[in-house]
Amino acid sequence: MKLLKSIILSIAALMTFASCTDWLDVNEDPNTPAQAAVSVTTLLPWVQYHLAYATGSHGYRSQFICQAFTTTSRTHRDGCSAQWEATSSLSTTSYQQFFVGAGPNLVDMYDKAIESGAWHYAGAAKLLKAYGFLLMADMFGEMPYFEANSVSPHPKYDTGETIYVESLKDIDEAIEQFGKTQVVGQPALSEGDSWNGGNIDKWIKMAYLLKARTINQMSKKSAYYDPETILDCISKAQQSIDDDTYIECQDIRESSKDFISTDPMQTNYNWNQTYNGNRHITLPTKWLVNLLTDFDNKGIEDPRTDKIIAWRQFSEKGVKVWRRGAGVDMQSDVRIPNGMANFISRKDGGWNPSIDTRASDSIYVGIYAGSVGVYSTPNIFYRAVDNWYPSSGNVYVRPNSPYLWATYSEACFIKAEVLFKQGKKAEAFNAYKDGIKANIDELNKMLTIWTGDAAYADCPSMGQMEQAKIDEFLNGAIGTALDITLEKIMSQKFIAMLYSTVNWNDMRRHDYKNYMGWQMPYEYSVNAASLKAIPQGKQWRRIKQCSHEINYNADQLRAIQPNYNDDDIWTYPVWWDSAD
């Protein structure tokens, strides 16, 4: 990770270029280098960081809408989302990270790469641009595309359809550029690539996976949905977990801060969403726990359960014991009227039902972890104070957890869905099973980071999954080709794509159906704020535009979406979410 450390040293030089539009650059600062002095090798990792942060932020926050997680607080941003109370605080971070942190540098990187014949950097710019604009279209529905980085202070908006069509063109150009031999003397992609180490094959597979994802996302649009093209793309995407794009993250004391969010830059993007004030309160829901502990009512626990549901250590009669947290039942009034204390004490359902009040433990365990670099804890177990009972976090939300960007497991699930819809149940089941196994293997690979460290040896959340449990689950819990359903495919994909933006996209695309046991939260039905933004009979379909757009580009926004500021704008489907 020397490359990532060197990137951080370039921040001071790069900040001067992080503006949404050229019109802001009215003066030149003699104390910072001119834009022409910044190389494509420096621009690429900078773009990668901000795009990944934008994606990670929305991916994490959208899981509360999906009912995978909740919080102890009903007034916190994520606690509001868990009860389908839409808040404007969901709108800004991803928008800023993409348009301020990544956007201008994407334009500059592409132009420089084309001019010099650094074709692989041009391909990276086009592919990362597609990722970013698709994210914006999925969140907000409409967004400036052609004029996004123009000189206009009031760029015109483009439709979601336009953004999707143009992004597919960008993906195709990226594949073409990656296939070229760079001009002699141009830097190898490995000099700037902080994700794949310059492995062109991985970039091409990443492009084909995004293309398959994008076309599959348009399943309600008959003019664009093309099952055979999707399957062709999948055949050229990841063929094993060795092809995954797997972003390494670090928990180090010299961690630098992001100038937009002030978060540490080397740490995992999911962990960054929890570390700054949220670490006490995020909890898994009963729905997610049920999916993991008893999928399809087979009575066989998913081996991933111990790794995804956090654990806390307690002292019971002088003996230290690890306990796995319970899921919060969002079909109940457990959070009403005043939310939940950080240490829940409940007579029914607790580990010791005979005790009404528990002073220092809970049946619920928050999804947060410590940090050697940020909190100066001795390891990544979280402790509220020194010598307090430690908690493990989960495998996706630790400061040094790798971030899964483009995976073989996703490719398998896309394939399974397409084949199932074609009536090819046996082939669909094989792809479905491959997707589950791939995700288990991906998590086991992540878990090697902590395996063998004595500090974590006795915590069930930290070690790798046992092969016997994996085999029992794959052979007994997931069903067979005879009973495969779209519900099973999408529910298992949800687990494999946990914390990904794909989950909320898929839920909307399927109209919140095809997920085993899923229901809207009870609190929604008794919360006036929820019902105002998402009236009964409607569903959460988009994120309201960022205040920067509403305040400074309202005329252009109104021209394309007259209802942009209505209370129920959250219920207006984005382009691909409306059936023909």
Image (cartoon, helix red, strand yellow):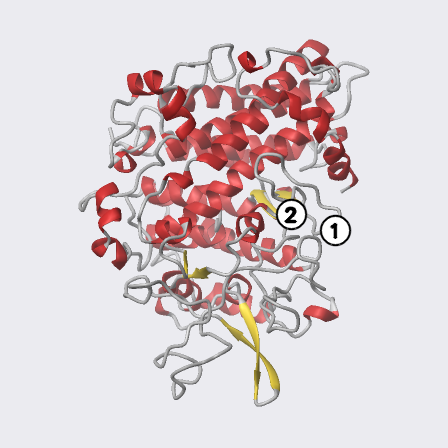
* Residue 416 place in picture, x, y as percent: 42, 46
Q: Nearer the viewer, residue 183 or 305?
A: 305
SS of the residue under disc 2: loop
* Residue 411 place in picture, x, y as percent: 50, 42
What residue sits 42% from the left and 19% below the top? 144
Residue 337 lies in quadrant: bottom left
Q: Is residue 485 visible?
A: no
What residue sits 45% from the left and 35% below the top? 92
Quadrant holding the N terminus: top right
* Kind of residue at badge 1: Arg
Residue 27, above or below 424: above
Image marks 2 and 1: residues in contact by CB distance under 8 Å: no
* Residue 136 place in picture, x, y as percent: 44, 30
Cα–Cα span, label 2 and label 1: 11 Å
* Kind of residue at badge 2: Thr
- Left or right: 476 as drawn, with respect to 6: left
Q: How many marks?
A: 2
Residue at the disc numbered 1:
253
Quadrant holding the C terminus: top left
Residue 79, above or below 160: below
Residue 247 lies in quadrant: top right
Sort mark 2 into few (<14), some (14-19) or many (20+) by Cα contacts within 10 Å: many
Residue at the disc numbered 2:
267
SS of the residue under disc 1: loop
Please report whichever mark, 2 or 1, sits nearer to the chain's N-terminal start: 1
Sort mark 1 into few (<14), some (14-19) or many (20+) by Cα contacts within 10 Å: few
Q: Is residue 201 visible?
A: yes
- Left or right: 248 as drawn, with respect to 304: right
